[in-house]
Amino acid sequence: MRSGGGDILPMDYLLAVDQGTTGSTALLMDTNLNRIADASVDFEQHFPKPGWVEHDLGEIWSTVVQTVREVTKHVETRKIVAIGITNQRETLCFWDKKTGEPLCRAIVWQDRRTSDFCAELRAKGKEPFFQEATGLLLDPYFSGTKAAWALKNWPQLKKARDEGRLAAGTIDSYLMARFSGGGVHVTEPSNASRTLCFHLTKHKWDPELCAALDVPMDIWPEVRPSTGIFTLTRGFPGLPDGIPITGVLGDQQAALLGQSCTEEGTAKCTYGTGAFLLLNTGRKPARSKHRLLTTVAWAMNGDQYVYALEGSAFIAGAAVQWLRDGLKFFQDASEIEALASSVPSSEGVVFVPALTGLAAPYWDAEATGMFTGLTRGTTRAHLARAVLEGIAFQSADILEAMQKDVGRPLARLNVDGGASANNLLMQFQSDLLGVELVRPKYLETTSLGAVIAAGLGAGVWTDFSDVEKTWKEDRTFKPEFTVEERESAMKRWHAAVSRVIHKPVQV
């Protein structure tokens, strides 16, 4: 591996902070991409009303501090040459520019409180305008409608704006403000492109988009390329001042990089809280005709934009957590595989994981979860298996839409995230998709992507070829279903989906 870092030595370190939906992770690697230490801390989810999901930014910051302290306690922190950040993307934060203190809870990407507002905009014929300009659809998922709601309903935000104290942004922006001791209000394109306010091809905040949402443009942070020096640490507990933050990416784009999907046509699916399938489409945005999203993958080497086609499922690993915490099926999420494997099939039971609405390709914010096919013979094992299969069915819908958009089949899909360790789920997913699934040895590719972005931004490596060789395969899952079995399974799924959505099935 070449080094372009001048004084950077092989045993210098790169630190990544992966701020996720249910917890924060810190990963420390050396500049040969050997793992030195990692640590994760969960935090509380707040549900003040049905369909509302919020995070306490103070709690999030506390977990970031805890994990960074944990991974750096046995190393010389002066050898950390750069920091990378990756984050849950559409979650919206508001804080005081002058003090750095949060002004309210963050509104999480899963939150559905703006469903009516999105419906009003669609009724006015605004969706084509937003889709063309941003690559996104009108859904509560994205940050822009959350901003509009918060500014109208939380008086402290209007007061802070009137006094010139209001800062808004995605989680990366908030973290960089805290890392720098309040010195910056910045973001980068993979996060900005998830707000409904950032123009996909003009590469800037757009006054027409902001006006359509009634969101002031001046609340948003400065947008810089995904790699390069964003800011320097100042006053972070346990770290010296002056460490540069040099790589920032939204979590799914970081996973795309961590999976070495740097060439046009390569794709990955991350199974975390939700499931996110991204296809690298190169330097030109691919416009979807099947209700997928066009998004920025990253902007590196100055201002070179790379785009991706994305399909999102809001609930994946979260469904397993629901079985564990809500229904008390087991004590540890890893137990689901043994339970589900204790029966040869779900015996016709189908689970639609619409616990926070349905995302691609349906985009029905009002859809709710459902089990169908229950009989007197149904057991916990059948329900557990149906939950795993429901996760896979969603991704099969997304891939079908993606293949129609690009006009060619996908030969291979890289998989990662915590739920990809479940062999039963991965085999069923391969069976449904009819393509090979390739799982890497290192499953936490989101954190790895942040490390790589930081290294590229700091000049540790000069290009993707320096780090692609580090990707190592763990296992390949090959499809075993016949065409007839695949079609029969998808028919059962679509029949179940049609019972929970509020519009015809179109995939």
Image: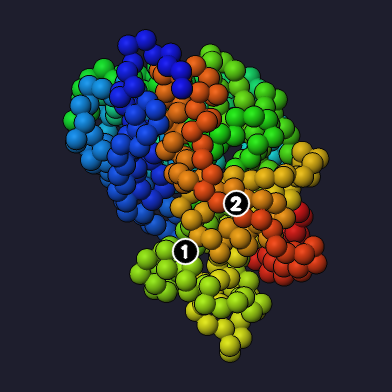
User: In the shown orientation, is residue 506 left or right of residue 299?
Assistant: right
N-terminal-most mark, 2 or 1: 1
Q: Is residue 383 above or below residue 503?
A: below
Tell me: 502 left or right of 239: right
**In the drawing, does residue 22 fall left or right of residue 421?**
left
Asked if residue 333 shows in the view, the reply is: yes
Residue 133 vs 224, above or below: the answer is: below
The one of 104 and 430 positioned closer to us in this rendering: 430
What residue is at 19 percent from the left and 36 percent from the top?
Answer: 73
Name which residue lies at 29% across and 29% down: 178
In the rendered image, residue 267, in percent from the top left (x then y), is placed at 63, 40
Numbered badge on residue 476:
2
> Alpha-carbon neighbours of circle 2 within 10 Å: few (<14), some, or many (≥20)?
some
Q: Element type at marker 1?
A: helix
Q: Please name the amino acid that badge 1 sits on.
A: Val
Residue in front for this viewpoint, 284 or 336: 336
Q: Are marks 2 and 1 in contact (CB under 8 Å)?
A: no
**Cα distance between the residues tagged 2 and 1:** 23 Å
Above or below for 156 versus 50 = above
For image coordinates 67% across by 27% down, the residue present is 282
Q: Work out whether residue 496 or residue 276 is closer to the camera in this orientation and state it.
A: 276
Q: Residues within 10 Å of mark 1 (few under 14, many from 20)?
A: many
Residue, disc 1? 320
Q: Quadrant of residue 142?
A: top right
Q: Quadrant of the C terminus?
A: bottom right
Can residue 147 be seen here? The reply is no
Image coords of residue 400 (percent x, y): 74, 51
Q: Position of residue 238 (x, y in %)?
A: 18, 30
Q: Which mark is residue 2?
A: none
